Amino acid sequence: MLAAAENARAPLAWFDFAGVMIWIVAVAGEAIADRQLARFRADPANRVAVCRVGLWRYSRHPNYFFEWLHWWAYVLLAIGSPYWWAPPTGALVMLWFLMKVTGIPPTEAQALRSRGEAYRDYQRTTSAFFPWPPAEGRAR
């Protein structure tokens, strides 16, 4: 945010508008993914089922993807700032945490414990992070 704020007096440019659009898409995408999952979990019939509806059909962790995407808004908003290098570093560190440390690994371990073979099948057919059409029988 500091890097973006350093550009506050500069005239607005295309990358400012692109940054705001990415931020809107990212916040909306995360909210939609969270709402879809909450609605799915609210149905008692889905207690041990795997959510494959909406954004969850295309990514096993669309909420994490959109959380990470929102960091790229700050990259665009910081173009021209003396601290331009900080936002890309933050986005890459966030990607590492989500993919390797606090995000996907513990979430997937819990899902395998609670949903077993149904989740293994979901892992075989659905992208872990980036939204992508499901692949029948192929690991992603």
Image (spheres, rainbow, N blue to C red):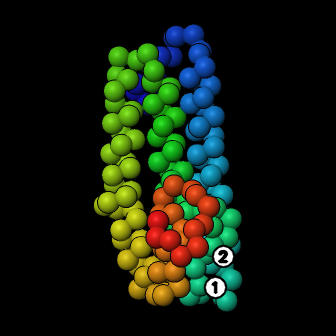
Q: Is residue 38 visible?
A: no
Compared with 115, 104 (above or below) is: above
Amino acid identity at mark 1: Asn
Q: Residues within 10 Å of mark 2 (few under 14, many from 20)?
A: some
> Which circle's residue, 1 or 2, is located before the other in the chain?
2
The disc label shown at residue 34, or none: none
Compared with 32, 22 (above or below) is: above
Q: Is residue 105 found left or right of 59 in the rendered image?
A: left
Q: Which residue is mark 1?
A: 46
Compared with 36, 114 (above or below) is: below
User: Which residue is depicted at the point 46% across and 40% down?
Assistant: 71
Residue 96 % position (x, y): 33, 52
User: Which residue is depicted at the point 33% across and 45% down?
Assistant: 93
Amino acid identity at mark 2: Phe
Q: Which residue is mark 2?
A: 40
Secondary element at image label 1: helix
User: Which residue is depicted at the point 34% across and 30% down?
Assistant: 86
Q: Are marks 1 and 2 in contact (CB under 8 Å)?
A: yes
Residue 75 location, quadrant = top left
User: Which residue is depicted at the point 54% across and 51% down?
Assistant: 66
Which quarter of the image is occupied by the N terminus? top left
Q: Is residue 39 visible?
A: yes
Residue 16 % position (x, y): 57, 23
